[in-house]
């Protein structure tokens, strides 16, 4: 009976830690999205103001180094695509329209395993355009499942060890 109590306590502890990790990963992804969008937005304002197309293209291309960024679109004030990452993302009119609709206004929105962060680009009181970043969070799920697998492996090892040990401990 003592073994069962210990296993239940370990199971509850693992579940609690797992839920805490999920909440932390969601908070981290949300924070990453907001910070990255602020950095990109600040860097995108001068090219929008002066209609310098090559600069934002290289700025958005640098997002390839961030594992979670799936798409980034920089829009002019009139709603047309000024720059896109990946470059072909701006060519799909249906996808662009869907993304603009989902990311209306400014802020962060979750949709399943996707985080959309949008930011209106304003300089000196003049709205120049907007930025939409789409973060794909499947890599987080993979890491959490790996973590859960190790935790379950540890619980299984604890069960095996508890069967091998004689009941000499008294509670």
Image: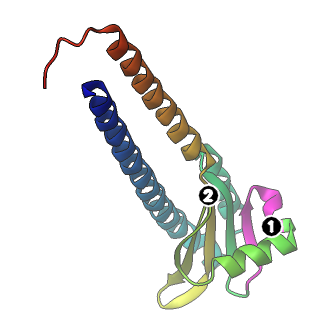
**Residue plotted at (47% across, 24% down):** 153
Q: How are the residues colored?
A: rainbow
Is residue 88 magenta-colored?
yes
Which image quarter holds the N terminus?
top left
Mark 2 and 1 residues: CB-CB less than 8 Å, in contact? no
Residue 137 place in picture, x, y as percent = 59, 52
The residues colored magenta run 79-90
Determine if residue 48 is in view: yes
Which image quarter holds the C terminus?
top left
Q: Residue 89 vs residue 23: left or right? A: right
Q: Residue 171 vs residue 92: left or right? A: left
**Residue plotted at (79% across, 62% down):** 89
Mark 1: secondary structure: helix
**Residue plotted at (33% across, 30% down):** 7
List the residue tagged with mark 1. Answer: 90
Along the viewing direction, whichever of 42 and 146 lies nearer the viewer: 146
Along the viewing direction, whichever of 93 and 145 lies nearer the viewer: 145
Within-10-Å neighbours for mark 2: few <14, some 14–19, many 20+: few
List the residue tagged with mark 2. Answer: 113
């Amino acid at each position: 009976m003592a073994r069962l109590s210990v296993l239940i306590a370990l199971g509850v502890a693992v579940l609690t830690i797992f839920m805490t990790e999920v909440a932390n990963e969601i908070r981290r992804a949300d924070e990453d999205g907001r910070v990255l969008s602020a950095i990109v937005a600040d860097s995108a304002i001068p090219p929008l103001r002066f209609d310098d197309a090559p600069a934002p293209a290289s700025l958005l291309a640098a997002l390839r180094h961030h594992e979670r960024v799936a798409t980034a679109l920089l829009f002019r004030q009139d709603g047309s695509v000024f720059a896109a990452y990946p470059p072909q993302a701006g060519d799909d009119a249906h996808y662009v329209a869907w993304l603009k609709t989902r990311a209306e206004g400014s802020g962060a929105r979750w949709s399943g395993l996707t985080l959309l962060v949008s930011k209106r680009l304003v300089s000196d009181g003049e709205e120049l355009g907007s930025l939409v970043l789409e973060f794909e969070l499947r890599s987080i799920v993979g890491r959490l499942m790996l973590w859960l697998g190790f935790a379950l492996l540890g619980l299984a090892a604890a069960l095996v060890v508890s069967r091998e040990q004689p009941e000499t401990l008294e509670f």
